[in-house]
Amino acid sequence: MSEFQVKVENVVAFVSLGEDIPLTKIVSKLENAEYEPEQFPGLVYRTKEPRAAALIFSSGKIVCTGAKSIEKAKEAMTKVVDTVRDLGINLPTKFNIKVENIVASSKIDAKLNLEDIAFSLENAEYEPEQFPGLVYRITEPRVAFLLFSSGKIICTGAHNIDDIHTALGKLKEKLESIGIDVKPSKDITSSKDIKLAKDAKLAKDAKKDAELAAKRALKDAERAKD
């Protein structure tokens, strides 16, 4: 466990039930459901408690996003499957829920010079005219960091909480190797940070990135089936 405080922003979970789901049949029976096959092949179903959104596909695959913890993601997924089963659809009562992506935030008590970091570190990308954050990738565990000049950090791509802490520890070592004094913040939800427009955009973009990653994983699974 690293010394960083971590807040989970979004968990993307995935399940393959092995049974076809008639989306046109169930959409009219589900509250908070949207199905526009000409726009997207999946049915979107939102749960209120826990708050999450599920992408349900006719192949029996479901992607759940928006939960704030692994436990809540699995709870939401189970609720979605149970709800569809209660509509008379033959679905298994036991299934394996996999975590595809965790988006988490943390913070360093320092102002970061992103241009200097981009120049000093390999695998770092910084294009301020396109996006205000620096993207830094590591391969073990395979995650991507978004670093902001405020000291805000977003980690995306992890499959469990331990990977996030391991990755943050490696990030700390890399930053210290180029002369940055890394002091993990004890308060990662300060009002000052919340008011930063860049950080607000960051959270929105990171969530979108997580959803896209889940859709890519779904497409890969479909190709493997074929």
Image (cartoon, rainbow, N blue to C red):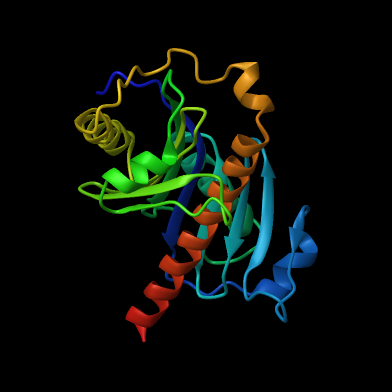
Name the outermost residue toward the top. 186
Instruction: Report the residue at 27% width, 29% height from top.
Output: 172
Q: Nearer the viewer, residue 8 or 130?
A: 130
Q: Horizontal and vertical percent for residue 203?
A: 58, 41
Instruction: Report the residue at 66% width, 74% height from top.
Output: 40
Q: Is residue 110 above or below residue 80?
A: above
Instruction: Look at the image and tell me in which quarter the N terminus lies.
Output: top left
Q: Nearer the viewer, residue 84 or 52?
A: 52
Q: Nearer the viewer, residue 30 or 152?
A: 152
Q: Is residue 30 above or below residue 74?
A: below
Instruction: Tell whether 208 sits left or right of 136.
Output: right
Q: Nearer the viewer, residue 10 or 221?
A: 10
Instruction: Tell whether 146 sits left or right of 120.
Output: right
Q: Horizontal and vertical percent for residue 177?
A: 19, 32
Q: Is residue 155 visible?
A: no
Q: Horizontal and vertical percent for residue 201?
A: 64, 43
Instruction: Report the residue at 48% width, 72% height from top.
Output: 19
Name the outermost residue toward the bottom. 226
Q: Horizontal and vertical percent for residue 78?
A: 51, 47
Task: Using the rendered view, name the quadrant where residue 208 is placed.
Answer: bottom right
Instruction: Report the residue at 75% width, 74% height from top.
Output: 36
Instruction: Tell whether 191 sits left or right of 82.
Output: right
Q: Is residue 21 above or below residue 4?
A: below
